[in-house]
Image: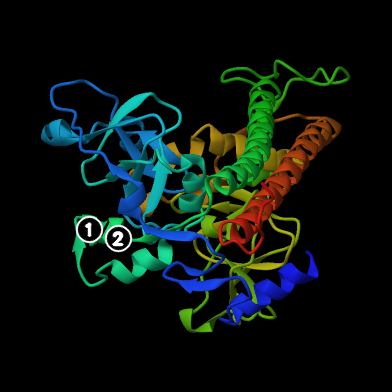
Amino acid sequence: MKAEIRQRTEQIKRGEVPEGYRLTKCGILPGWEIKRLDQIAEKITAVAGKNAYETLSISAGIGFVNQAKKFGKELSGKQYEKYTVIKRGDFSYNKGNSKIYPQGCIYRLKERDIAAVPNVFECFSISNENPDYYEQLFLSGFLNRQLSEKINHGVRDNGLLNLTKDDFYSCYVPVPPIEEQQKIAEILKQCDVVIGLCQEKISGLKMLKKVFLQKMFPSSGETVPEWRFLQFTDEWEQRKLGEVCQITMGQSPDGATYSDVPSDYILVQGNADLKDGWVLPRVWTTQKTKTADAGDIIMSVRAPAGATGKTAYNVVLGRGVAGIKGNEFIYQTLVKMDGDGYWKKLAAGSTFESINSDTVSGAEILIPQNIDEQNSIGELFKHLDALITLHQRMLEEQKKKKKALMQLLLTGIVRTKT
C-alpha cells in the first residue's frame, strides 16, 4: 500500500478529514455527490396479480432462492397476488435480520428474467447511474450504519425489522462520476469472477470425493467395492464400530468452569466446534471430564448427529460429542455414513435427535481385512481432503482481498484512473 493511501486511511480511522475529502452523511468521502436512495432508485410497484411467476425469497449470504426449495413448500398463499414482480437487474431489500446481515440485505436479480418476491421486500431499479457499482456498494454493507440508526430495535413485525419504506429510501449513497462508478464496478466484478472460479473448483472436488466414496466403498448388500486398488481382492468384513475402535462418549464439565482463556482445556461440545473437518477451538474449560487425544476422530451425537471431524489438539469432550480412536479409513467411513444420512435416520424421533453409546458402538460397518487396503484408501481421501482445504483457504483469501478493495474503492480512499 502506498504511503499516501496508508496515511489517508489512518486519518479517516481517527475521524480526521484528509485534504481533498469532506465529511458527509455517508461518512468521509472525496468530492463525490451525495444523494438519497430515492433520488437514484425507481421504486417497483408491479404486482403478480393473476399472472404466474416463479416465487423467490432472499437467503442472507446467498441471494435469491426458489421459495419452495428453501422452505420445502410455497409460502405465498393468498398473498401471492400482492407479490412484487421484478425483472433481471432489479434490486430487492429483505428487511429480515440475520447473523451476517443484522440490518437486512440487498440483492440484485441476475439469474432469472422475471420473478415474484414477497411484497414486504423493498424493490427498485437503478437506470440513470451504474447499477453494477451500486450492487457492489450494497453488498459491501455500506448502508448498514444508516439502516441501524433508522430501525426501531424495540419492535418487531413478524420477524421483520421495523423499518418504514420512507426510512429505507431516505438513506444516503455516494454518487461518483459515472466513469468512476464503471471502473470501480469492473475491478470488483473481476474479484467476483476469481471467487466464482474458486467456488467452482471446490464444488468440483467435493463432487469428485462424493463419487469416490460411492465407488470405493461397497454398495448395500455387497462385500467388495466397485473401484479398488488392483493388489487387493479379499472381501470386506462386517464389524461393529465398537469392536474396531475405542469410543468415548462426552460428559460436559460444570458450566461454571467454562472460559475464554486459550491456555485452559479446549472444550468440544458439538458441530459448532467443527470446521472443514477439524476442531476449531471456540470454548475452553478448567475442568477435565471425558477427553480425546490429538489425532482422534470427533463425532457429534446430538443434533445434527453424525457431523464428523478430527482434532489436532488434546480436548475435553462435552456431552454433544464422542471421541473415536480410529485410522483415516475409519474417519472416511464415518464421513460417508453421515453423508448417506445413516445417523440422521437413527436419531430421528429421539430426544434432541441424539444417538447414545449403544447406537454408536453398535453401528455396523464394512472394512477391508487387509490393513494395507485400509491405509491406501485412507491416504487417497486424506490427500483429496487436503486439496479441498487448500482451495477453501484460497477462496477465503480472495474474499478478504475483495473486502479490502471494497473498503478502499467504495469510500474513495483509493481513486481509480478513468
Residue drawn 16% across the image and 32% down it: 80
- The answer, for residue 350, to whether it is visible in the render is no
Residue drawn 77% across the image and 43% down it: 386
Say left or right for 126 vs 379.
left
In the rendered structure, find residue 359 and report the number of the disc placed on it.
none
Circle count: 2
The quadrant in which residue 327 appears is: top right
On screen, residue 160 above or below 242: below
Q: Amino acid at mark 1?
A: Asp
- The residue wearing badge 1 is 166
Residue drawn 36% across the image and 55% down it: 104
Residue at the right extreme, as displayed = 231
**55 or 42: nearer the viewer:** 42
- The residue wearing badge 2 is 170
Check disc 1 and report its element: helix, strand or loop: helix
**37 or 357: nearer the viewer:** 37
On screen, residue 318 above or below 116: below
Q: Quadrant of the N terminus?
A: bottom right
Q: Position of residue 231 (x, y in %)?
A: 88, 19
- The answer, for residue 386, to whether it is visible in the render is yes
Q: Position of residue 287 (x, y in %)?
A: 59, 80
**418 or 395: nearer the viewer:** 418
Q: Position of residue 284 (x, y in %)?
A: 60, 75
Q: Amino acid at mark 2?
A: Ser
Say left or right for 32 vs 48.
right
Asked whether the beta carbons under mark 2 and mark 1 sit within 8 Å of each other, the answer is yes
Check disc 2 and report its element: helix, strand or loop: loop
On screen, residue 3 above or below 49: below
Residue count near mark 1 (Cα–Cα under 10 Å), binned few <14, some 14–19, many ≥20:
few
